[in-house]
Image (cartoon, helix red, strand yellow):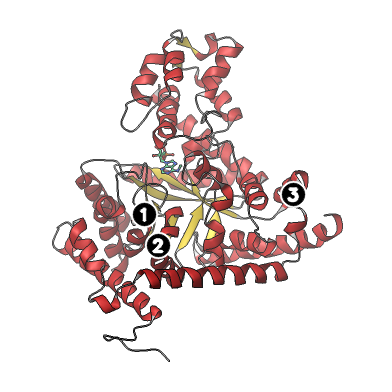
Amino acid sequence: ATNSYGPTGVTLDEKIAHAHWRYRDAGKVLAIRVNTRDGVMMRGEWERRLAATNATLAMTPRDFAALKARQAAMVAAEKAKATRESPIKLDAIRGDPAKVKAFCAAMPRVAMLHIHPSGTRDLKTVRELLTELDPLVNGSAIIEEANDGVLTTLYPSELAALEALPLQRYSQFDAAGKRTIEELFFLPVSPEDHPFTRFEALFSIADILLEQDDSTKVYLEEKTYVDFAKRAVRLGLSYAEFTKVEIPPTREALDRFAELKALINKETGGKLIANWVFAFVRTIEPTSLNRGWARELVDLTKEKEEGSMRGIDLLANELDTPALETAQGIYMPVGAARQAGEIRLKSTMHSGELGDVRNVRDAMIMGVERVGHGVLLREDPVAIEYARANNVGIVCSLVSNRLLRVETDYSNHPFLTFLRLGIPTSLSTDDEGMFRTDIANECRVAVTNTDIQYSEMVALSRNSVYESFAGSATKERLLATLAGELKAFEASYGKTG
Ligand SMILES: CNc1ncnc2c1ncn2[C@@H]1O[C@H](COP(=O)(O)O)[C@@H](O)[C@H]1O
């Protein structure tokens, strides 16, 4: 029997329920503050509103320990169940790289939800773009943008090499020089992992080298998408959701999504459906800029809902840009317009990648139906319970997280714990070109470094459909496709694997 609230005998579940009620209550106050009163919620008030209303309802260290133990037991039980129910036994191939690779090449998958278009370019695409655009390579201009010391940094050895580059076009370099320029588009192989600012430098470098001429903008954009789309189809994907920065929002930019969707569809012979999520940048100051753009986006969307633009996102370096402070002016107006039935935009947020461990909690309170990365959610068992209860999706990118020091040991990455706790978790590649990965490689990383079971790999694939922002008819079609492919895969794998 459950005890009622009171000075004694408050159960753990009641304390969790109370904490979640505080989440919802704080969320309502935040919406009123931002939308109705045009005000701001400061951190101190926020945390006070989230705290338990009296000491008997507060989580104690013992409660946290008990909740963690309960979650650990759930994870263990789920693992045992998955092991029993999996028709393919991954434990039998885990130690054999060739078998894992073959499994991951053939394993059916259908959707990917966390893709930065300009991060997708692989070496082939980069080479072809450089050859076609033949940019002027200006080492000091690259240093200025890609090593601003705040958002972007390069390593000292890289600065020296860039300074030594002759000022000339890509085509004028010899083969070794061309290789050097091409490598500037990828995260260095050494050191093994990097600060976020070194990663962010890649986007500046790509912009400087590829966007020298406005007349080739369309070519660059289309080739980037189409090359990715063709690779995606080869890897078995039928659906891709891109997160794209197009601030400030314009009618033209939104209409462009529809054109690109049609182009991708045509170029893949109808095999890949693409949708977009409109991304805000959390490092932009003052935050009132994002607030104004969010309202403009709502107005544009009200006027004419863009079928290929399905939601909003917030991205960039999460260190020192906490979700409460950077997101409230964006997510509150969009959420209100959605609740009022004026728009249908959904919301996701990069959160729990770096920085404040409260960001995933706060993103969920602000109404996101899905988070990108989410890794730091593992620090907050009460917020984990909220994600479980509300089916908040988490899209994880294993290689990205290792390279950017989010979780440097694959075997400690929490994606599998989240999945086993019943949180709809899926895998995506984030910036697959820059990180030299793809979705088959993410599978390989998962199977090699964790005790994931086959039925759980299937769950990751299904979750990528459930948690997508596609319409329900598309989702049903994708799930049916996946079911058919899984059946065939399991039948053939049993014979040859
Ligand atoms: C590694 N995980 C990540 N975490 C946070 N932000 C990321 C990111 N990967 C990329 N971005 C952000 O997306 C922008 C490029 O957008 P487009 O393609 O030009 O729309 C990058 O500048 C970076 O801030």
Figure quadrant of residue 15: bottom left
Report the number of numbered marks: 3
Q: Is residue 376 above or below residue 77?
A: above
Figure quadrant of residue 347: bottom left
Quarter of the image with the C terminus is bottom right
Indicate the secondary structure of the residue bearing disc 1: loop
Give the Cα separation between the discs numbered 1 and 2. Answer: 8 Å
Residue to which mark 2 is pinned: 380
Residue to which mark 3 is pinned: 95
Q: Is residue 179 above or below residue 422?
A: above
Residue extending farthest to the bottom is 1
Whether the residue under disc 3 has CB within 8 Å of ligand 1: no
Please state the horizontal and vertical placement of residue 98, each as a whole percent of the image: 77, 44
Give the Cα separation between the discs numbered 1 and 3. Answer: 34 Å
Is residue 108 shown left or right of residue 343?
A: right
Please state the horizontal and vertical placement of residue 90, each as a whole percent of the image: 73, 57
Q: Are marks 1 and 2 in contact (CB under 8 Å)?
A: yes
Q: Nearer the viewer, residue 495 or 62?
A: 62
Going by the numbered disc 3, the residue's amino acid type is Gly
Please state the horizontal and vertical placement of residue 37, each as a whole percent of the image: 13, 62
Residue to which mark 1 is pinned: 357
Of marks 1 and 3, which one's residue comes earlier in the chain?
Answer: 3
Is residue 208 shown left or right of residue 38?
A: right
Please state the horizontal and vertical placement of residue 82, each as a whole percent of the image: 66, 68
